[in-house]
Amino acid sequence: MREEKVFAKGFCFAKIFIFFLIGCLFGTYYEQMLWYFNNGTWIEKQGLIYGPFSPIYGIGVVVFIIFLGKNNDNRGIIKTYIYSCIIGGAAEYITGLLSNILFGVKFWDYTGYYLNIDGLTTIPFMMFWGILGLILMKIIYPYISNLIEKIPYKIGIPIYYFILIFMVLNCLLTLIAFTRMTLRNEGKEPVTIIGEFCDKNYDDEFMYKNFPTMKKISG
């Protein structure tokens, strides 16, 4: 008897990618609601040019799953929480640092916040990451993982590849647009068709409108 294929079975790339998407979506709407409660205005917050995706949260979820997923059932709550604090804070810090160095912009700035670390993360936020990681690994991950594997194989595979290709192109385009913005702000003219395309379609006005909380690093 032929064994029925299971979509995204076990600990695999397809499943990790789906959790990446879930993290991206959660992060976008969480940030928008947080901004609304703190400032009383609604803005569109996202990390990619197209779609309501915030990659920092998606990356955070992926890092949690990669480091904590395989032995999740055998790890206690306290260890999971401590590891989640460290992983979440480190992911936020490194991502913020890279955006500062590579593109000369800040997507968040915790300078002045209590127990902040170089303005890129804070100890209280790391503790919050720990709570999110604990909930993710002990409640959400096992439940959603089971639901994902129940998706019919013939339906899941084409949808998965379509979204995967879209997200790869979306991430690549966003990276190119930010790279060109950095070069443009340094006074460098485009030398390729891609650079000209970015200057025409993704100029500074578009970028700051699409990423409204982004700030240039002075000096």
Image (tube, rainbow, N blue to C red):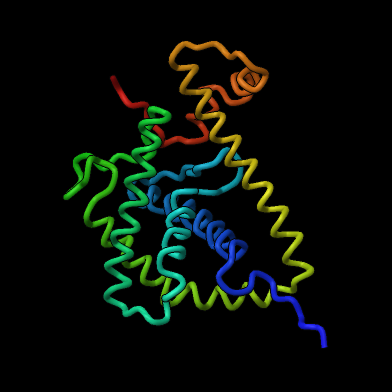
Residue at image coords 32%, 46%: 93
Is 78 above or below relative to 189?
Answer: below
Q: Position of residue 123 (x, y in %)?
A: 22, 55
Residue at image coords 59%, 37%: 172
In the current view of this chain or complex, which residue is farthest to the left? 115
Q: Position of residue 164 (x, y in %)?
A: 66, 52
Is residue 59 shown left or right of residue 75? right
Is 39 above or below relative to 106?
Answer: below
Q: Nearer the viewer, residue 206 or 181?
A: 181
In the current view of this chain or complex, which residue is farthest to the front? 1
Q: Position of residue 60 (x, y in %)?
A: 42, 56
Is residue 79 shown left or right of residue 102? left
On the rendered image, what quadrant is the C terminus found in? top left
Residue at image coords 50%, 77%: 142
Is 80 above or below relative to 48?
Answer: below
On the rendered image, what quadrant is the N terminus found in? bottom right
In the current view of this chain or complex, which residue is farthest to the bottom? 1
In the current view of this chain or complex, which residue is farthest to the right? 1
Q: For residue 171, which quarter of the picture?
A: top right
Q: Position of residue 77 (x, y in %)?
A: 31, 78
Numbered marks: total: 0
Residue at image coords 58%, 78%: 146
Q: For residue 18, which quarter of the picture?
A: bottom right
